Image (cartoon, rainbow, N blue to C red):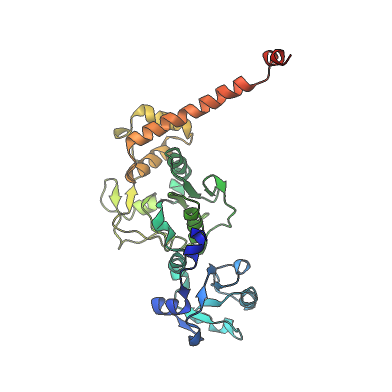
Amino acid sequence: MNRLADISYLRLTIGYIVRTFGAVCDKPFASCVTFTSIATKVQEVTQGSLFVPACPLSEDGPLFQAEKSGAYAIGLEKGEEKAARNLDIPIIYMDNWRENLGLIASFLMGDPSLKMAVFACFGMDSKPAAPVLSQLLHILGNPVCLLDFENSFIQERPLDLSYPLDAVDVQKVEAQAVEEGCSAMVISANPPTLSRLALTGTHVDVCTGSRVLDLISKPGTPRTLQPQEEPLYGSVFDTSTRVVAYANDPFGLLDTDAFNQLIDVVPMGSTPVRTAISMALSAGITTASIRKAVSIAGKFPKEREAGKRTDCPGEGHDKDKS
């Protein structure tokens, strides 16, 4: 049994949800029912799922379809009692299902964000830094997962996702990334990529973007985000979360030559590269590691180009054959 199977069978039960989140089940005798997955879309329901509709339902058709597909229970807001009449499976009512769904999914998946370094670029202004940071971390030898509506991948393997992602989608990708050996995840946290509370249950280690910088009153970088401050997309910030100004100038820590080499390797413009370097440094990566990795990576394109020229068939190659 692989690690993903192990963490997916933590005992998430109806009783746990009722006790932890103040929910009410219409069938109290079903408290020991155990879930193997969570689905917010009826087409994703499998045997053993907890089905929680992503938004309030105007009809009960999806609920019956979820029951037929093998859902063990359905989660609804307390104001939606009328939508769930005549169902045989348990119904769990809660005042704030959507706010707590990410926490429940994180518990089921074994808190995958705690097993990786998580970087979040909040807002469209910092979006260009996300793919640059993922490339920089890859150059540094870290298996990386990127969540971005334009290009999501796990270790260069493209992900087929439906955007914007909700909290359950994000937790599933995080668990999959951990299973495939990723040590870092970069999240492009913006409306095209994420829904309102998509990062609920996700612990963020380093973040940037004007929206998160507005939460900090004192100048200076890197800055520590206090847990009482308003989270973005429901993400979990604590006293170890580092906030990096996206306009940082890393030349004081990284020499100009190494910076220009990185621009050649990751041709995305100087501002995203500055932000990516600052976030990497804030996570504890040393400037010596960046210099060495960039130097090695800068040689690859030249070597590949030289190899192509050598391998091109020409007259000399034909003569050797004859």
Residue depicted at x 34% and y 51%: 213
The picture quadrant where one finds residue 309 is top right
The vertical placement of 140 against 67, above or below, is above
Horizontal arrangement in the rendering, residue 52 relative to residue 272 (left or right) = right
The vertical placement of 221 against 174, above or below, is above
Front one among 263 and 72: 72
Residue depicted at x 37% and y 26%: 257
Question: Residue 93: image x %, image y %?
Answer: 48, 80
Horizontal arrangement in the rendering, residue 11 relative to residue 43 (left or right) = left
Horizontal arrangement in the rendering, residue 208 relative to residue 105 (left or right) = left
User: Residue reaching furthest right?
Assistant: 322
Which quadrant: the C terminus? top right
Residue depicted at x 47% and y 35%: 266
User: Residue reaching furthest front?
Assistant: 1
State whether residue 195 appears in this view.
no
Front one among 277 and 34: 34
Residue depicted at x 64% and y 78%: 64
Q: How many numbered discs sit on the rendered protein?
A: 0
State whether residue 40 appears in this view.
yes
The picture quadrant where one finds residue 311 is top right
Question: Residue 179: image x %, image y %?
Answer: 49, 55
Question: Residue 55: image x %, image y %?
Answer: 54, 70
The vertical placement of 61 against 188, above or below, is below
Question: Residue 302: image x %, image y %?
Answer: 51, 25
